[in-house]
Amino acid sequence: MDYDRSTLRPRMMHIGFGAFARAHVMVFHDELLRRQNSDWGVVAVRLHSGAEDLTNLDRTGGLYTVGEMSGGDVSLREVGAVVETIHPLRDGMEALLDRVADPELSLITLTITEKGYCIANGHLDVDHADISRDLRAPASPGTAIGVIAEGLRRRRAAGHGPLTILSCDNLPSNGNLCRTAIAEYAERLDRSVAAWILSDCRFPSSMVDRITPAMTDDAQQTLTEALGRPDPNGILCEPFRQWVIEDRFAGERPDWDLAGAEFVADVAPYEEMKLRLLNGTHSFLAYLGALAGFQTIADCMKEPVLVQAARNLMLSEQAPTLDLPEGVDAIKYADTLIERFSNTALHHKTTQIASDGSQKLPQRLLAPIRQHLKAGRDWPLSAFAVAGWLLYCRGTSEQGGTLPVNDPLSGTIAQIAQGADGADFVREMLSLEAIFGDDLPRTPAFSDAVQSAYDQLRSDGVLTALS
């Protein structure tokens, strides 16, 4: 370890301390600590599952391993940024809320996925079962939104000053969405607290990028062999990492730029580029690759038809909808993504990426489709992506294998799939306003293109249809 961990204080809290947080946010922070004499220690928090993982982390004194994999090579890093762990089911909710209100804390970072913000149509979903429960019992919240809002209320009451809350999830304008969710939650309970949150706290947006597959038994074995011992909190990921952060903080901030992060005035162009070129293409490969029987993204990249289709989607359909950041070459960026997708060391399962499609589709694929419709441009590969998701939702690959439909709307999707097929199935799925809005289903150029692509996938199969 290249820094004195005994000097670290609980200056930063990360809520949602899962695989991505360990491989991305904590690695940037660990690199900062290696480069600067800093006291910015991290409090690692999980809210629901993961209590045992945090206990395992406590047993190692907060140390864990990140293995960066490329081909057959594994580069190991011991991360020592964590100084404390909290899980409300293990430690009690008061311990967590007291830490949020602690004057030493300056920053909360989040990786809670799209679902964790409980947003519907750009606003807090007050009818969400978990939010409704929290609003009835705000002193014992169960959601990240409720925890942060109650912690901020206690901070203000104690006169300890505002916090910066930094979202690190794959959402456009993630800072604004986070701000909206927390402020609108607080508004329901105490308008003066909500006003303080809006005026004094800061919610910068950020763009994060690092491919981090879920840890499997094989991945654990690979890490054990490279490390020479098991590490239950260890994680494997790709070498590439990127973090672009809006430079808008309530007070002092960590100097993550020393570790390669970029502080910018506007994150939006970077967010859109990543969401559409990387995440949109990832989803395209996940749905269609899983249907065709490919287990991982790297497996997909061994099929020339999928490689060419992915590259064409990026350059011919996604890139024209973007205002690329200054200095970014779309062709070079696309080729870099193809190279990253082809990393055989990363067993990134297509079915893992295919999860939560109802929440990923709107920003990754439907937003650019709307731009194409407005401009009168063709979008055949995007149509195959949407149709691929619809067919994936029926739960069966071309070989007859089972495809897991892990989605917040899985119950509704299963009901539609059981009761309808063919054109009726497509029509009923496209009528899900939470995904497609009320405009796309009423646009023949959209519904006809998706129906045609769906029919072609069913009749010809993925690879023939794409070629």
Image (cartoon, rainbow, N blue to C red):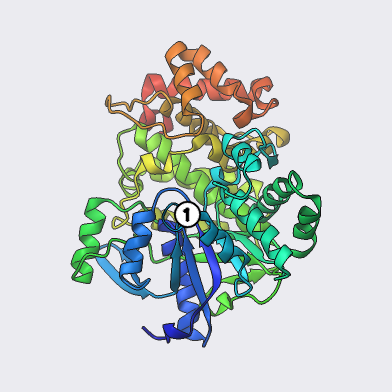
Q: Is residue 333 above or below residue 119?
A: below
* Residue 115 seen in this snapshot: yes
- At 58% from the left and 42% from the top, the residue drawn is 317
Query: Where is residue 169 shown, x and y percent of the image?
Result: 55, 53
Q: Is residue 273 left or right of residue 349?
A: right
* Residue 327 seen in this snapshot: no
Q: Which residue is mark 1?
A: 88
In terms of depth relative to the viewer, which is nearer, 342 or 282? 282
Which of the 4 quarters of the picture holds residue 310?
Answer: top left
Q: Is residue 149 left or right of residue 345?
A: right
Query: Where is residue 201 shown, x and y percent of the image?
Result: 72, 63
Query: Where is residue 427 shown, x and y percent of the image?
Result: 56, 17
- At 57% from the left and 39% from the top, the residue drawn is 130
In terms of depth relative to the viewer, which is nearer, 278 or 309? 278
Identify which amino acid the numbered label 1 is placed on. Answer: Pro
Q: Is residue 460 above or below residue 5?
A: above
